[in-house]
Amino acid sequence: MDFLEVTLIIVGVIMISYLFLGQLLEITGESMDPTLLDKEQIVAEKVSLLYSPLKRGDIVIFRHPHQTRRLIVKRIIGLPGERIKITAGKVYINDEVLDEYYVKNLHGTVGGDVIRENVEYKIADDSYVAMGDNREKSTDSREWGGVTRELIIGRGFLVFKPLSNLRFIQP
């Protein structure tokens, strides 16, 4: 009976932690390279979303806008209400070029089906624009537009596997 009780408590703590504190996720693909690598496993923390607004540069985990069972990892590029434009491989926010030190190929940003080249896109008041750091290998907001706040699950916090790559995820 004691074993069953301890097991139920452990399962309960794990479930509560998973639902409210963190989300485990394996990176698949090269869209966040070199920041996050294919097959790395990360922890996304959920708590800070309750008291700290999302910022440009945050790495977030969210449900795909059109396939909500699929989880995506990208970087926040544009904030609610801003104007974004892609021109000559560069991203402009409210007419100012965005310094993207984290992008794998600084001149590799091209427009997509929704956020098109040389066309200004106004971000909705409840949405964010999210893009991968490896723009040539990333399907992101350029293809499906803004990501609403309700789809965002957490911020990238820690790479825990493989152990040789153990590190905190920096925005």
Image: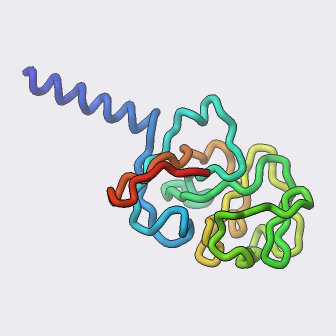
Q: Is residue 77 above or below residue 47?
A: below
74 or 168, which is in the foreground? 168
Residue 158: image x %, image y %? Answer: 45, 48
Judging from the image, the colouring scheme is rainbow
**The quarter of the displayed image where residue 72 is located:** bottom right
Closest to the observer: 36 or 120?
Answer: 36
Q: Quadrant of residue 106?
A: bottom right
Left/right placement of residue 165 relative to residue 133 reads: left
**Closer to the camera, 147 or 40?**
40
> Looking at the image, which residue is at 77% across and 74% down?
111
Residue 41, given in percent of the width and then of the height, sits at: 39, 57
Question: For the point 90% across and 56% down, which residue is it?
Answer: 94
Relative to 147, 10 lies left or right: left
Locate residue 169, reporting x and y percent.
Answer: 52, 51
The quadrant in which residue 126 appears is: top right
Locate the N terminus by quadrant: top left
Residue found at the very far left of the displayed protein:
1
Q: Residue at x 84, y 48 (%)?
A: 81
Q: How many marks?
A: 0
Q: Residue at x 77, y 62 (%)?
A: 99
Above or below — where is 55 with respect to 11?
below
Seen in the picture, residue 167 relative to 100 is either above or below; the reply is above
